[in-house]
Image (cartoon, rainbow, N blue to C red):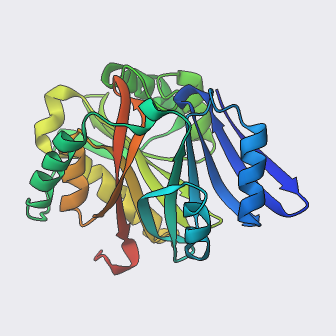
Amino acid sequence: MAKQENICQPTFAMTLFLDEGNKRLRIDDYRGKVNDIYSYMCKEIDKAMYEKWIIKARAEHLLDWMSLGFSLEATVPYYFNGSDAYLLCYYTSQSRRDSGETLKETELLQDVLNLPTSGYSPLSNQLIMRRAISSDAKQLSQLYRQIFTVYPTPLYEEEYLSSLLQDDNLFYIIVDKNDIVSAASAEIDYVYHNAELTDCATLPAYRKYGFMKHLLSALEAELKQRHIFCAYTIARALSFGMNAAFHQLGYIYTGRLTNNCYIYKSLEDMNVWVKDLSKSKG
């Protein structure tokens, strides 16, 4: 189970996201004395349960966190209403810190970065791309269940997806003869005006058609209408197709999160890609 807690102490306040399923925690927001936040974490957090700590840090606190043993794994430019976020990580387990796929992932990334940026072909007339609605929850959950053995959030549960769609979460889908064959979403932060493009999935039989570029472009257009210009994603470092899609749409690689979450079949490293939508055409 995952939960969010707002913690206030005399010298600091923070928004803490506790993610037991992925054995990690994340400080999404904070203010106050960095050393006191760290002391609180060391005292109150079960280090066996939470093997990876992630801080979304601001530039002025970068050296403070690094002096406490945190390492910089990625950045998200423009995250805080135009200012950069630094994704700093701390590990309580050596096995969580070490990745056995680094060389393979780096080679894959180089192959992706050597690809030209490109557009995409029009969708076939028999296909429909549209925004998902709450009645799509059952089919969407079936799609995610087919693609992912494990996933950081319970997208394979119809009730969970239905609640997201009823709460105006932004999902786009591609439908072939009434069947959802591809989907992606944007998780929007209206406080700091950024969005994570996530929950990307396409049935294997349809992966050669480049559907994800269509979905991501549609999500970008929606975000720009809402004046959300910082778009980023955290993509499986071992997925050539997903990394290629973001690169070819003009996203910039900004780092890799080691053993970040359980996704697809196991614990995996995740690449971070970022795009400033205010500079993109359309």
**What residue is rendered at 52% in x and 30% in y?**
22
Which image quarter holds the N terminus? top right
Residue toward you, 64 or 130: 64
Q: Position of residue 80 (x, y in %)?
A: 57, 71
**What residue is rendered at 46% in x and 64% in y?**
223
Which image quarter holds the C terminus? bottom left
Would you say 86 lies left or right of 129 here? Answer: right
Would you say 241 lies left or right of 167 here? Answer: left
Would you say 97 lies left or right of 239 here? Answer: right
Is 281 placed above or below 97 here?
A: below
**How many badges with numbers are in the image?**
0
Is 7 placed above or below 137 here?
A: below
Q: Position of residue 242 (x, y in %)?
A: 24, 45
Residue toward you, 29 or 130: 29
To which quarter of the image does residue 249 belong?
A: bottom left
Would you say 168 lies left or right of 219 here? Answer: right
Is 70 placed above or below 92 here?
A: below
To which quarter of the image does residue 217 belong?
A: bottom left
